[in-house]
Structure formats: structure tokens, C-alpha cells
Amino acid sequence: MAHLLMLESWVGSMSRLLPRAVREAGHEFTFLTRDVHHYLRSAPEGTAHPLLAARHILTADTNDGASLLPFVERAHGALGFDGVITSCDYYLPAAARIAARLGLPGSPPEAVEAACRKDATRRILADAGVPGPRFAVCADWADTAAAAHRIGYPLVLKPVDLCAGMYVRRIDDEEQLAAAFRALAAFPVNARGQRRAPAVLLEEFLDGPEVSVETVTFEGASHVVGVTDKSTGGAPAFVETGHMFPAALTPADAAAARETALRALDALGLDTAVSHTEVKLTAGGPRVVEVNPRPAGNRITELVRHVTGIDLAAACVDVALGHRPDLRPRGTGLRSAAIAFLVPRTGGELKAIDGAEEVRGAPGLLELQLAEPGRAVEAAVSNNEYLGHVMAGDAAGLGARGRAESLLASLSPRVVAR
């Protein structure tokens, strides 16, 4: 039995999948957080959050690196950790620094830090010749306006250090640019109480389908598990509306996406990680959107598991412990699996979601998860506002996306003004 230190977590599906993977492998974990109530609030009423089933729960200021490392060293001396994991992007660099300080497996902290900073990723990949968009890192409004003129519209404005598509916007003119710049500047602290970097990233707008490449890197060698597709909506925001694994691509496009992702991982120096690399397939070839040195979110790992039998959450645990993960595909009876998200278009209070009972009994359904009535609803501008999802599989071919979208269309949220 190994003992892992889990440093914070998202409160979505990975906050359940990682503890499950630890438990099913026969290991245990200690959970370290700055605010245990953050997780208590996210659990459905009357249930306990899986993170709180940890062997130990430790509280410390996980945002203060200067005090965190000595605290963890003392905890390690008393409890003995064999690996460090987190699912939350905002704590990936800290987890890497802890692993390095304790002499435990993990990618170099500077590599993880670079992957988690979109501006650093852009510079490193450009220097290595890995294809990406034309870009500019801007310190203030004057820099931003001048860079937009150089790059040309349409373009994309991004924060350098936020997640889930927050404040990422398509920009078609200077008026939109100014509005997006002001909105981002008015959000100086992220959801975990960390002060944001003020830099703004501008990128050439890339036209073409977007996919993600799911990889596992162990002892410096990267293995591609597969390629997932993505659909988005909510323009000018980029809200993920669904995914299918495997992506319906030509062999040439799939190979190009895989090769581009591997080049990006190598350029960043991510030698010990489960990663999720997003790639745009443009008319001029593949272009890296971003590299995430953690398992994919939005239940993509479950799509992979339903089709291949490979558990990427379990691989994340193995890699963190220095164990070679089992990446052998196993027959599951499905050739594709897809998820479609229920994205709110208006704000208010959720009264009900009609059609749920019909969907619940539909053939091919793998998961149905819906928000409870009474929830406050906001029109989606990122991946944080979903009202639920439908997941479906197809045993015959690549029909899972169509099936999931058809089932989603049967659901009708009733939202009333508050």
C-alpha cells in the first residue's frame, strides 16, 4: 500500500475519479487543503465528498509557497508520502515543487510551471519550432491595442493563468478588444484566492476543428492513448459543448495531431505526467492551443475508459508513484463514447429539467447527470456553468456523438427570473 499526498482538487468529476483510482489500486491518500469547507459545500446534500474520506486531512495555506514546502516536509517526516497528485490546474506547479523537494516522482517544476502559464508555453513552443498561432504577450492596454493591430482581426484574447475557458474571447474589432480587456482586468484574483498575473495573451484566431491528445509520459517516454474531439459554443466565448472519443478523423489528421502533441510535451520537458494537449487542425496544419499536464477534465477520461478500458485517473496515480501504468487496451464492446453538456443560455433559477425520465431509459445511455432544482443559473461564458450532461456509447462505430446530442436535445431546462 502506497500513501499519496493529494494537494487540493477540482470539485468536479476528477475530485471523485482520483480518490476512486487511489482506493481501487489499494493505496491511501492524505488530503491537504487551505479550505475544507470548499469541498463540503460542493457535495450533494446528505453525502460526504470522496476527498474527505482521506486517511488524514491537513489544513495549511496552499497558496503560500514559502510556508507550504516546510509544512509538507514536516508532514512527510511524520506520515511518509510516496507520491504527490492534484487535479486542479492552480496547484499543479505547487505539487511539482513538493514532489521535487521530497524526492518523489514528477516532471521538473519549471516544466509544469511553463505548461500552466499560457504565455510561457507559447514562447517555449515557438522557440522549439512547435507550430502554434502568431501571438503577443501584452502588459497593458497600449501593448494590447498595438499587438492586435499587428496580428490582425479576428483574434483571441486569453488570460495567461486561468482555466475552463474563463475570459477567453474571440475578438473581431477594437471595441470588442477593449471590452474583453476591461472584463479580464476586473477579475484580479482567481477562484482559489490566488492573485492573477496581469499579462494578456493575444493569439491569431485559428480556424478548424479542435481535438485533444491524451497522453501518458513515464520515464521520459510518451504514449498516446488516443485523440478526442471537441465542440464549442457560446461565441464570443469558447464554451465546450461536447466531446467524442475517438475523434472522427482521417488517419493523416490523427497522426498529425499526435505528433504535434508529442513535440509539445518534449519541448516543455514534461517527462512524468498524464497530459491533455489541445490542437487545432487548420488548413495550414496542426497548431497547439495549450498543454495541460494533468488528466483531461469534462469526463473525457471516462470516455476513454468506456472505449479502451484504459483508466487515465489510475495512470495518473501510477505515474505519481513511479509505477509503470497499464496502458493496454481492453475490449469494452464500444467503439465510441461521447458526452454532450447542457449549457444554460439564460440566467435565473432552475425550476426543473423536463425530459429526464425519457432520457434515463434510452438505449446507449452511459451517464445522465443533471443539476437539482433551485440552483442559481447564469448564462454560460465558460465551462463552469453547465446544468448537467449526457454520455452515450456506440458499439457499431463513431455514432456516439450523434446519439449523445440527440438525447441532450430531449432535455429542456426551465429557468425563471430570480
Image (cartoon, grey):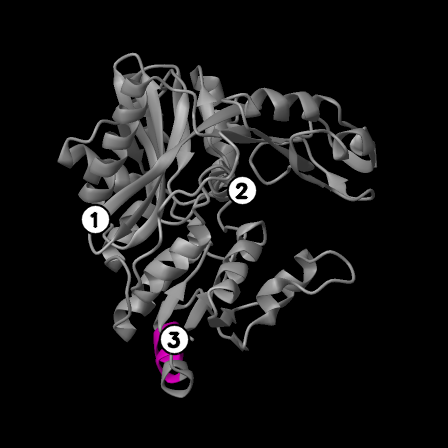
Which numbered disc covers residue 67?
Answer: 3
Q: CA distance from mark 2 to mark 3?
A: 34 Å
Which numbered disc covers residue 299?
Answer: 2
Relative to 30, residue 333 above or below: above
- Tell which circle, 3 or 1, labels the residue nearer the N-terminal end: 3
Badge 2: how crowded within 10 Å, few (<14), some, or many (20+)? Answer: some
Position of residue 416 measured from the top left corner of the image (x, y, whole percent): 84, 31
Q: Examine the residues drawn in magenta and state their main secondary structure.
A: helix
Badge 3: how crowded within 10 Å, few (<14), some, or many (20+)? Answer: few
Q: Is 320 covered by the magenta stretch?
A: no
Position of residue 172 measured from the top left corner of the image (x, y, whole percent): 44, 15
Position of residue 147 measured from the top left corner of the image (x, y, whole percent): 29, 24
Badge 1: how crowded within 10 Å, few (<14), some, or many (20+)? Answer: few
Relative to 253, residue 11 above or below: below
Relative to 325, residue 40 above or below: below
Question: Tag 1, which secondary structure?
Answer: strand
Span shown in magenta: 67-74
Asked if one can make out residue 240 in the rendered structure from this viewpoint, the answer is no
Task: Give yes or no for contact between labels 3 and 1 (Cβ–Cβ under 8 Å).
Answer: no
Q: Amino acid at mark 3?
A: Ser
Residue 200 relative to residue 242: left or right: left
Badge nearest the viewer, 2 or 3: 2
| Pointer 1 residue | 221
The answer to which of 80 and 167 lies nearer the viewer is: 80
Of the 4 image quadrants, the one containing the C terminus is top right
Asked if one can make out residue 160 in the rendered structure from this viewpoint, the answer is yes
Question: Tag 2, which secondary structure?
Answer: loop
